[in-house]
Amino acid sequence: MAVSRQIIIDTDPGQDDAFALLLAWAAPEELEILGITTVAGNVTVDKTTHNALRLRDLAGAATPILRGCSRPLVNELVTAEYVHGDSGLDGPDLPDPRSSVESMHAVDFLVQTLRAATEPITVCVLGPMTNLAMALIMAPDIVAGIDQFVIMGGSFRAGGNVTPAAEFNVFVDPHAVHVVLTSGVPLVVMPLDVTHQAQAVPHRVSSLRELDTPVGKALIEMLEFVERHDITHGFEGFPLHDPTVIAYLLEPELFELRPGRISVVLDSGPDHGRTVGSWRSDDDTAANGEVAFGIDADRYFELLAERLATF
């Protein structure tokens, strides 16, 4: 069993964010979730916060949820209702939240929590990086409280999913990505190159379909909603992007990682939001992180089914 670690999850739920959050809540012996910070991305921050609260109720959890930034640092907000539906979590009929968000802003929570850390905290990044960039700009000293950023975002060889060049999370706020990538904090990145290998094809989700629980039923209804988009775009099933971040913390051996120097294109042309990796080992391109290019996808879905069956 993995050593217990403290984490913060920054997220914009989102159906695949829902899988990631529930997987983290299903691993209390390995992961202590200090807080969940929400950000605008898949839908507006009001909706992502509402969704995080509904998911907390579904899980029967008590993790603090903190509302974050409502727009990117520089760009106008781009959202993805065309994938996730108007609510951002279409599919299941989840009730309105029974509890409310914390009064503290997510950026203030990040600064306060990371400054007070007695041991470095892992920050899990499932959406645009606006909250994290704001915290790093406001309080650069918080890097001492961060063990690593584990990020779902970017694409190196697989092409983009919002433009030919760019992955959605990076495209929404590439300037925030630049702040995070240049912070000096170690990075582990789950790009489209690996998440596109984690498609929810029928044989992989059969065990999830057998979960006769409110959580299991809700997740299958989410999959059935979002897969209509990806199947029309050439996939056999919806790629479960965001849970790769949590799966890496639980079973890092599932992934094949390669060290590299990761950067992002900030110009306004067709490469806007493109992630770039240099895989050379000379001093001028020293690695700032590791990038996943391979995954044991069948075991990944087995892990999801095993953990989510505990609800």
Image (spheres, rainbow, N blue to C red):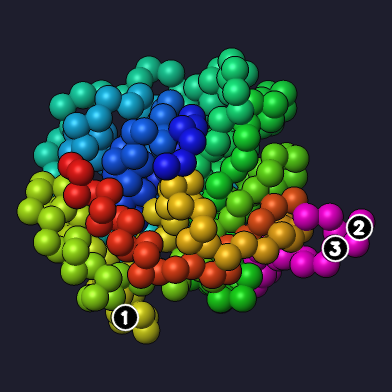
User: Which type of secondary structure does the marked residue at label 1 adopt?
Assistant: loop
Q: Quadrant of residue 282?
A: bottom right
Residue at the location (16% across, 27% down)? 98
Three-letter code for the amino acid on which mark 1 is drawn:
Glu
Residue under label 3:
281
Residue at the location (46% across, 52% down)? 251
Three-letter code for the amino acid on which mark 2 is drawn:
Asp
Q: Earlier in the sequence, mark 1 or mark 2?
A: 1
Residue segment shown in magenta: 269-287
Q: Residue furthest front?
A: 1
| Looking at the image, residue 4 lies above or below residue 309 | above
Q: Is residue 14 visible?
A: no
Horizontal side of residue 183 vs 248, given as left or right? right
Q: CA distance from mark 2 to mark 3?
A: 8 Å
Label 1 Cα neighbours within 10 Å, binned few <14 / some 14-19 / many ≥20: some
Residue under label 1:
236
Q: Quadrant of the N terminus?
A: top left
